Image (cartoon, rainbow, N blue to C red):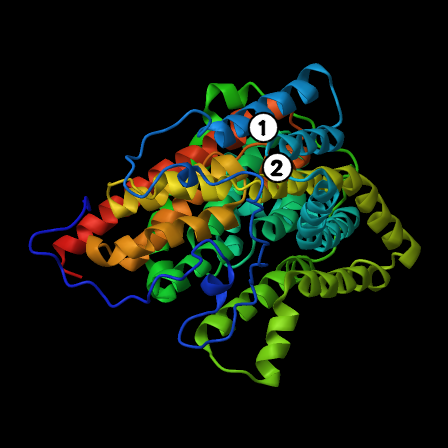
Amino acid sequence: MTTGARSPPRPARRLPEAPPHPAGLPGALAGRHGSKPSPHRLRPHRQPRTESVPPPHAARGPAAPPTVQRGTDMPLVVVGISVLVLLLLMTRLKLNGFAALLLVAVGVAVVQGIPVKDIPDILSEGIGGQIGDTMLTIGLGAMVGRVMGDSGAAQRIAGTLLDAFGPRWVQVAMVVTSMLIGVTMFYEVAFIIIVPIAFTLVRVTGANLLWVGLPMSIALSTMHSFLPPHPGPTAVAATFDASVGLTLFYGLFLAVPVGALIALLWPRLPFIKAMNPAMPQGLVSERVFTEEEMPGLGWSLLVALFPVALIAGAAVTDMATSGESRFLHSVAFLGSAPIALLLTLLLAIWAFGPRIGRSLSEVSASCSSAVKAMAMILLVIGAGGAFKNVLVEGGISDYIKDVTDSWSISAIVLAWLIAAILRVALGSATVAVVTSSGVVLPLLAGSGAHAEMMVLAVSCGSVAFSHVNDPGFWLFKEYFNLSVIQAIKVRTTYTTVLSVLGLGGVLAAEWALDLMSL
């Protein structure tokens, strides 16, 4: 197990110099060896505002011991109090999630010393950035899912899965499907594509919604957080000059068993089985179709897998090629999630509309019902983005970076720990992975750790402790129709266990690689 420098140390691979601003995104996204940026590009964020809140180290001279002074812990205290206030507003006062998140975000901004005149812009940027990333994906995906549901295509796929695996193994069917699709697709995109099938399986089998849907979400979370070409691992691989191919190879050996174990175990826990949420209204068809009314399996699978093929094809092309050309630009364009889902919606409208005798007005009604059901979900996710942006702009990530600079522990454990702390404080996996990778980059050469293992350690840390400042938490909560407390019990616990087991797997893999002298 890696615990620091070895004697004699294994020659470390040559690493690039540490970037002057390790917490900034552009350096981590520039790609390796001059290659073009990935289509899964992370959006650069503005540097946190720190003029009103001096960094913790500013109050002490260079030779001062790293003691914690009065008020130093305030940023994390503010985060903790803000979460408690949010829970109070939503559980005791029954305030709408959108309004509660905005109120707490404004309060945190004021406490953190952000100028009042800047707060509206920060909220708008947070909402706009989050909605800009998710509205097209979620909106188009919900329309595709509802069109498939109202035509019987989702029931056709669900019935086929039941026939292939049987009702007893429906969870295995969801895990296998989610892992295959989730290797190359963002969590939100894959979630929106698969969830109509999960809803239909619940309706057909009469099973608990979490019994069928939770394995899907856990499998997708694992794939998204652990593996390239997802944005977090890809960015960290570029920072550490790690091989994306080897990171994916090692990551699969960790992600598949860990994700499958948690996905199959978690719905069986007593506190999960005690929950029995109803399916959200408007997102699934209540009609049960006869065999003659349903479209064929070929067309149903074609529409369901069409965006998967486009997005996966673009990701594979990006990893396998370099340079610039009109063809590569076209592949990246078609493989972007909004375009892939827009094309899928057009295909679904024709395949499950005029082609089978349904009028365009009927198909349009399906799209409209999906949009109505998504309105509040999108508002809540946007408000979650505002809360996250306030935490970032308040300088909390810089505070955590300064505190952990002097820690002397294993580079792999430190990378995981910093990412986990940032994830808890900010809710943003993107900020967590990029900041933590910048902090530990100078330690990597002397630690003797494999760069690919460091990438996986950071990625594992970034999945931990998903809670109310994570916009993905609200997507999960709303689609599974849970209360805030229930969502914390389910999602926060499974993401934390995934993260801890992932760290254990990384340490074991690093030890095995050292034994084999690889």
Q: If you read the primary sequence from the N terminus, does the residue marked by circle 1 or circle 2 appear first?
A: 2
Per the image, the residue denoted by label 2 is: 476
Q: Amino acid at mark 1?
A: Ala
Whether pointer 1 and pointer 2 mark residues with C-beta atoms closer than 8 Å, the reply is yes
Secondary structure of the residue carrying numbered label 1: helix
364, 72: nearer the viewer: 72
Q: Position of residue 230 (x, y in %)?
A: 49, 57
Up the image or down, 304 lies above or below 371; here it is below
**How many numbered badges does the structure rendering display?**
2
Q: Residue furthest left?
A: 8
Give the residue at x 64% y 51%: 193
Instruction: Assign the N terminus to one quadrant of the image.
Output: top left
Q: Residue furthest top?
A: 92
Give the residue at x 56% y 52%: 47
Question: Is any part of residue 226 visible from this angle?
Answer: yes
Q: Is residue 23 left or right of residue 407?
A: right
Q: Residue 347 falls in which quadrant of the image? A: bottom right
Up the image or down, 286 lies above or below 291; here it is above
Q: Is residue 338 left or right of residue 64?
A: right
Per the image, the residue denoted by label 1 is: 487
Q: Amino acid at mark 2?
A: Phe
484, 301: nearer the viewer: 484
10 Å crowding of disc 2: few (<14), some (14-19), many (20+)? some
